[in-house]
Amino acid sequence: MKKIFYITTSIFILTIILFSCKNVDVDNTATKFNYPETKTVDSSDTYFGITYKDPYRWLENLKDTSVISWFKKQTDFSYSYLNNLTGRDELIAEWKMLDSLLPPRINRRSIKNGRIFYNKTMPKEDVAKVYYKEGINGSEILLFDPTTYVKGKTLSVQASIPSYDGKKIIIAYSEDGAEASTIKIMDVDSKKFLPETIYPTSVEIQPNWSFDNNSILYVWLQSDDNTSEEMTLNAKTKLHTLGTDTKNDIDFFSNTSYPRLNIKPNEMPTISLRQSCKNFVFASLDEVRQEMFMYYSPISQFNSPQKNWKVLCKPSDKIVRGIEFIDNYAYAITSNNAKNYKLVRVNLENPDWNNAEIIAQEKKQTLEAISYCKDFLFLTYSDGINYQLFKYNFKTKKLSEVNLPYKGIIGIACIDKNTNDCLLSIVAYNKLTTEFSYNASTDSFSPSSFNKPPNYPKAYSELEIEETEIKGYDGVMIPLTIIYKSGTKKDGNNVCLMNGYGSYGMSLNANYYNELENTLATKGVIIAIAHVRGGSEKGEDWYKAGYKTTKPNTWKDFNSCAEYLISKGYTSASKLACFGESAGGVLISRAITERPDLYSAAILNVGTANKMRDEFSPGGSTNISEFGTVNDSIECKALYEMDGMQHVVKGTSYPAIICVAGWNDPRVIAWQPGKFAAAMQNSSTSNKPILMKVNYDNGHFTEEKSVTFADYADQFAFIMWQCGHPDFRLKK
């Protein structure tokens, strides 16, 4: 899921009222699995005359000892099976082997005053370390090692941002996937940290340096308690001057400092400074909505107690997906009269979006992102499967396509905006990420000095890829990507893993976790990616066709893809597994509750499955703009339709299910998949296992490769076992 933040006072009061429970009971539906006992309670909510039962409401109190015990028992029960599956350890071993073949992974690169800063993860290392060089040919110098900084703990670097003069660097780190980070500031030459420590700060919003290199801007959180609805409500962007007490940091931008702006508690007030446009300070109200809400003020007011914030763009202007500030202009992607998006430009002296200059008209493909270098602006387009790259010449004002070395999903970055030298990466499902040095002036490609392609075993380059469209339940054509081992017969005997997402207008690219899934493909498993409505594979209309009241299209599209795979002999219902993560939990929980006959097994990885309670969780009120609220009669009904737990029917034969939660996850709180698993355990008659596993060293996800490998090995081994793959069996 995207950023997920929190709850108004009125809703909080309602939560307290609705939390009362009575008449405790225990449901002991007979199965061959001796699940930990799960009590039910007489708890319900009534909205607009309709009562919705919630017998597992008690699981929402993650600080209650009985709830903590329940999750621990469920996790222990899960491992009594997972630890005894053949093939699980072999998956981990193969992923480690593949990882050892990779070159160093380098990211977060930037050049400041001739110094090149970057994060690098070596093969067999769990997390990235921070380095720098004095120029491209300089010796590599280690600045920060998160594995040794705190004895006995492995931290994850969330931000490494050098000052403009390259003399200092912000290091922000977190532990165990937590959503609150600690900020330290290092003197680069001495490699020593300055005295100040700033905590808690946002993991998602990157800190900024002031142009004088003497202060930083950061998003301060109210709390670091990932179970609290207050964690990121009423956040503030604060200004810290180096060498001063953090207690005196200035409230630079918040509802408290600017009440006239009426910033909502769930909107994250964020400040950014742009070297390409030094005349202004930019402020945004971050939320999960697609449309941007931004203010700006003259840089001359930076140190003023009160700035004259002017609206740059509001949601009705329909600025989405990205905006770049170059000289005195704003270049922005808009959906205004362009369902596949177009690129426009306005002068910051008078940003009139209704009369904006059109830089690139809407195309058949979807405009995904923009970036720039010295003389060119880059536009990335997608048809839902493959990408195209165009460049706009600032001088000639001409738009032209860049001929790529091969098809795939691309990313482009220019770490030195004063040149036309860029780094361009391409990844396809049968080709791991390859990075090229690309000169935009000459359109020439050469191997990147930062990153070289790995030498994977031959089997990984012999996978066949089908890119097709299938007819959905209502006649709409749904993009479907199918990957399998060369020579695979379509006789219905293949295990198949199909994944999907379909939320927030985010496209599910066909390289999704490719290293992990490709290992299954080399073992004869068919991998399918369903590009369902709710993403933006086909533009704004595709997104809005799986949004709030139209959300059922998301899982109905997914089930249509399942029917296609079965009807064409790729697999059969007894060998088909489905996989969804985060907001993809809506998709999977409703796909299997609506059509349990189509699937043998399912994965809900940190998946939300109790949407009617979502806005009362730490992952709460910000999601109202995407999914709706129970306080609106129409949206309440839509949330009920999305709620997997509400649609579990006692006495139904459901697939095998593994639900996974991160104990430190505030985005999808552990009780979201927990309540769904409890309902399934007490209702399913299939005699197939329903597992609930907690990762106690995870948040929503984690950077640590060893933890990631073990987690996905659990999930994949489980579904392969349940789908009858010969390499995955329960040890006797």
Image (cartoon, rainbow, N blue to C red):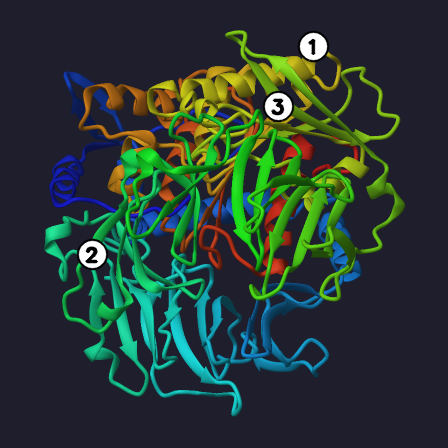
Q: Residues within 10 Å of mark 1 (few under 14, many from 20)?
A: few
Does 627 sit above or below residue 437? above
The answer to whether residue 282 is visible is: yes
Q: Which of marks 2 and 1 is in front?
A: 2
Query: What's the residue at 56%, 51% (across, down)?
Result: 395
Query: What's the residue at 74%, 58% (across, down)?
Result: 99
Toward the front, the furthest residue is 396
| Residue under label 2 | 309
> Mark 1 or mark 3, which has the lower sequence index?
1
Q: In this view, does 702 lie to the left or right of 647?
A: right
| Residue under label 1 | 567
Which quadrant, please, contains the N terminus?
A: top left
Q: How crowded is mark 2: few (under 14 residues within 10 Å), some or many (20 or more)?
A: some
Q: What residue type is disc 1 on?
A: Ser
Pick the residue in front: 489 or 190: 190
Query: Residue 478's spot in the image, x, y percent?
Result: 58, 18
Does 41 sit above or below residue 144? above
Query: What's the residue at 57%, 77% (across, down)?
Result: 145
Does 406 sit above or below residue 105? above
Q: Is mark 2 on a helix, strand or loop?
A: loop
Query: What's the residue at 17%, 39% (across, down)?
Result: 15
| Residue under label 3 | 600
